[in-house]
Image (cartoon, rainbow, N blue to C red):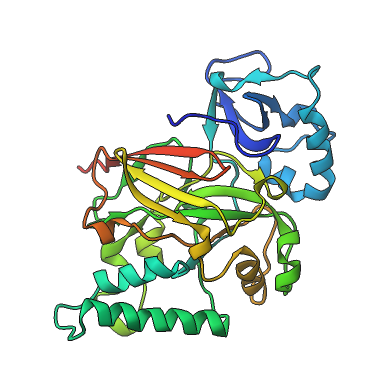
């Protein structure tokens, strides 16, 4: 397991279970928790209501945020050491909105990696052309967003099963915004008022099935390439937005078996969190607990020519949000 260091700010939120049964908490039963200084408070008992999970806390964010601040400083409560707890995905979202082609360098790298052998362009020409496309997208304010399934979410330290059909499973570490209150047709200026906090998501993708093989005109197949069970390791924490500062200036780092593969600032995003939330809300109604994944920076496996395989260990971290560690295991087949 990755080091469970205290994230930015005085407290963060997570979902936990006890490793050994206690009278008030059977082993394996999850509970929403407040993390502060290496200790955890069971929020299902400490709040004025009994939330079934962390999403219920987020649904009442404006009401609960000042209470959480006060609880953090109360040493008389029944805190327990973090070391004795298992950490799960922080919440179960209703909806997952995923931003694609949102990091300038990443898209340029993918364009080069996916070039046809018959492409007459040089590498330099291909990079220049896609860079021009990125500039135009940014100027025209057209993010690229698609939808993922909540069933892909797994814990930040759980094993990731690589499906037997996935020929090119790849990593994509991303900053994820957690929605605090319903957002529909909000402006860019209003958008961040609807964000409770931030967490880490690894949006795994099978590169071999991104594009349809039977009919190219159909385009991308996001169901097939991104929505296998466990393809979105999430967490470990939700860090309140007030503790994160500028989400457009965080470091996203992924190591594969100890070797750094992704190491980029969110400054490289074409569209920041506010623009993404506003854009999505023009079409869809964002709900409390929903996730907005902001895209992945350069350094994916398809760029390095090294895709995921059985036994690989991914360590992902984002400034102030903690770290996750997941081990890949090949799916057992009959």
Q: Position of residue 273 (x, y in %)?
A: 61, 63
Residue 284 visible in the displayed image: yes
Nearest the eye: 150 or 318: 318
The residue positioned 39% from the left and 67% from the top of the image is: 105
Left or right of 87? Residue 14 is: right
Q: Position of residue 219 (x, y in %)?
A: 35, 79
Q: Is residue 235 left or right of residue 239?
A: left
Which residue occupies 76% across, 60% down?
A: 193
Quadrant location, the C terminus: top left
Residue pictured at 25% horizontal, 57% vertical: 304
The quadrant in which residue 224 appears is bottom left
Q: Please, which residue is most extreme toward the top here?
A: 23
Q: How many labels were placed on the picture? A: 0
Position above or below: 307 against 42: below
Note whether residue 218 is visible.
Answer: no
251 and 98: which is toward the camera: 251
**324 relative position to 25: left or right:** left
Report the quarter where the N terminus lies.
Answer: top left
Residue 49, above or below 219: above
Q: Which residue is depicted at the point 63% across and 70% down?
A: 275
Image vertical order of residue 243 relative to residue 30, above or below: below
Horizontal and vertical percent for residue 48? Answer: 85, 34
Q: Quadrant of residue 243?
A: top right
Q: Is 332 positioned to the left or the right of 235 in the image?
A: left
Decide which of 247, 59 is in the foreground and name it.
247
Q: Position of residue 182 (x, y in %)?
A: 74, 62
Q: Name which quarter of the figure residue 12 lies in.
A: top right
Tell me if residue 199 comes above or below residue 190 in the rendering. above
């Amino acid at each position: 397991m990755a080091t469970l260091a205290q994230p930015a700010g005085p407290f963060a939120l997570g979902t936990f279970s006890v490793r050994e049964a206690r009278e008030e908490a059977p082993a394996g039963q999850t509970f929403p928790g407040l993390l502060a200084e290496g200790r955890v408070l069971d929020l299902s008992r400490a709040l004025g209501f009994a939330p079934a999970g962390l999403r219920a806390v987020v649904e009442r964010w404006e009401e609960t945020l000042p209470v959480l601040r006060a609880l953090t400083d109360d040493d008389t409560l029944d805190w327990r050491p973090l070391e004795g707890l298992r950490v799960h995905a922080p919440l179960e979202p209703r909806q997952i909105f995923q931003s694609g082609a949102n990091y300038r360098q990443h898209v340029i790298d993918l364009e080069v990696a996916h070039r046809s052998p018959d492409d007459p362009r040089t590498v330099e020409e291909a990079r220049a052309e896609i860079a021009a496309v990125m500039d135009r997208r940014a100027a025209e304010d057209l993010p690229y967003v698609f939808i993922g399934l909540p069933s892909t979410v797994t814990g930040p330290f759980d094993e990731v099963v690589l499906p037997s059909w996935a020929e090119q499973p790849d990593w994509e570490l991303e900053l994820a915004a957690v929605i605090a209150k319903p957002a529909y047709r909000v402006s860019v200026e209003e958008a961040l008022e609807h964000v409770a906090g931030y967490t880490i998501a690894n949006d795994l993708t099978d590169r071999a099935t991104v594009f349809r093989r039977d009919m190219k005109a159909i385009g991308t197949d996001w169901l097939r390439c991104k929505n296998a069970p466990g393809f979105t390791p999430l967490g470990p924490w939700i860090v309140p937005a007030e503790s994160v500062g500028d989400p457009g200036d965080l470091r996203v780092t992924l190591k594969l078996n100890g070797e750094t593969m992704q190491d980029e600032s969110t400054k490289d995003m074409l569209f920041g969190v506010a623009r993404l939330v506003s854009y999505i809300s023009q079409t869809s109604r964002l709900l409390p607990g929903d996730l907005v994944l902001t895209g992945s920076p350069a350094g994916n496996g398809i760029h390095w020519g090294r895709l995921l395989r059985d036994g690989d260990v991914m360590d992902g971290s984002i400034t102030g949000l903690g770290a996750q560690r997941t081990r890949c295991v090949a799916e057992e087949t009959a």
